[in-house]
Image: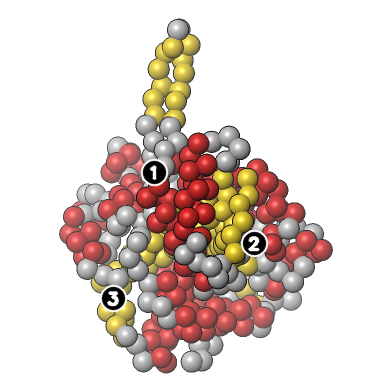
Amino acid sequence: MRLKLAVIPGDGIGPEIVREARKVLDRVTEIYGHEIQAAEVLMGGASIDAFGEPLTREALSVIRKQDAILMGSVGGNAATSPWYQLPPQKRPEAALLRLRKEMNLFANLRPAYLYKELRGACPLRDEIIGDGFDMMIMRELTGGLYFGERKTEERDGVVTAVDTLVYNENEIRRIAKRAFDIAGKRRKKVCSVDKANVLDSSRLWRRVVEEVAKDYPQISLEHMLVDNCAMQLVKDPRQFDVILTENMFGDILSDEASMVTGSIGMLSSASLNDTKFGLYEPSGGSAPDIAGKDVANPIATILSAAMMLRYSFDLDREAADVERAVEQVLEEGYRTSDIMAEGCTLVGTAAMGDLIAERIQG
Ligand code: NAD
């Protein structure tokens, strides 16, 4: 298969961690007989430096011709970087919002998986962790409260702010379908999270999710109120497979879920539209504090590349091979500094990429 990729190294640690993910992908394609056709694209601060804006029309047109994007992260140190002297719509992060909008990336996926070797980094008690957990938070990314009408005005002499939470049935249906499809590749359970005891938008959410569920008889569906879900994530995270939720609830729950797994350097993510196209990037930022020092953990980006193989190219076996290679390297005791523990071997960014690539077996 030919994998047509836009590769966006980005800023800070971005180029270092993307290089390692490419190393692993090159190894996968070599072993499994695929071919990568990569177009490198500048975005964020790197694009501001080169072209004066964070995402050019040319860059977008190159991206549109690809099947997926592999990205580092964009942005710099807001206190010191000249990029932050620019108006908000010209800053590095504006490129990300524009890219999501232009490519209609409405479904954000963040896995929360606890590696048994990293149990020590999990803040939960042993009896709660049990034999580990493995869940996927699916958050709606382009609707809801963050995109509804908002205003601040004076009402009867009192300053009043209004945000509007809007969803239509089509927006709910398309993300629900995505969640059921993804559950089909996993343990076949969807937990849809809402606040249907209070919000109209949640009652519609629940009704549409129920309708979609009828087309997926092999997937079990339960509904959970968001406040209960926030508790259950720390009380019994093992009960979850796919958690499906709207934008703001997902924003909060995905951070909560990811923090029970340990380092930000381990957390992959994907943003998908209603074709196979997706943007794959680590959940963390560009970490300017450690950029260029060969200390960043490349695993989140490597695992994001594995998600790309699975969700944009349906290469499930190859994706599983990458995930297994990561697990093996951790089992053998190799660690970057963010996940370092006593008795383990400290390695840098490039060495971690080499170790993982070498363990891809086919
Ligand atoms: P950050 O995630 O970059 O860093 C937070 C902390 O985590 C830092 O101590 C950093 O060293 C550490 N860290 C992050 N990734 C790591 C890795 N792979 N290995 C080891 N340690 C890692 O968050 P921040 O400092 O708030 O943001 C820095 C810049 O990144 C800002 O400009 C911000 O806007 C941008 N940002 C971009 C994205 C994106 O491109 N999607 C997301 C979040 C933040």
Indicate the amino acid at tag 3. Lys
| Residue bearing the label numbered 1 | 168
The residue identified by callout 3 is 4
Q: Residue furthest top?
A: 157
Q: Residue at x 57, y 82 (%)?
A: 324
- Quarter of the image holding residue 236? bottom right
Q: Position of residue 140 (x, y in %)?
A: 45, 51
Tell me which colouring the rendered structure shows.
Answer: secondary structure
Instruction: Judge whether 219 appears above or below 35 on screen.
Output: above
Looking at the rendered structure, the kind of residue marked 1 is Asn
For ligand 1, tell me if the residue under mark 2 lies within 8 Å.
no
Q: Residue at x 28, y 43 (%)?
A: 90
User: Marks 3 and 2, how far apart in space?
Assistant: 33 Å
Mark 1 in CB contact with mark 3 (< 8 angstroms): no
State the CA–CA distance, disc 2 to disc 1.
26 Å
Q: Nearer the viewer, residue 309 or 229?
A: 229
Name the residue tied to disc 2: 240
Closer to us: 146 or 125: 146
Q: Is label 3 in a helix, a strand or a loop? A: strand
Q: Amino acid at mark 2?
A: Phe
The nearer-to-camera label among 2 and 1 is 1
Measured as percent of width and height from the top left, residue 173 is found at: 42, 54
Relative to 161, residue 74 above or below: below
**Left or right of residue 93, residue 138 in this image:** right
Q: Quadrant of residue 345?
A: bottom right
> Residue 21: which disc?
none
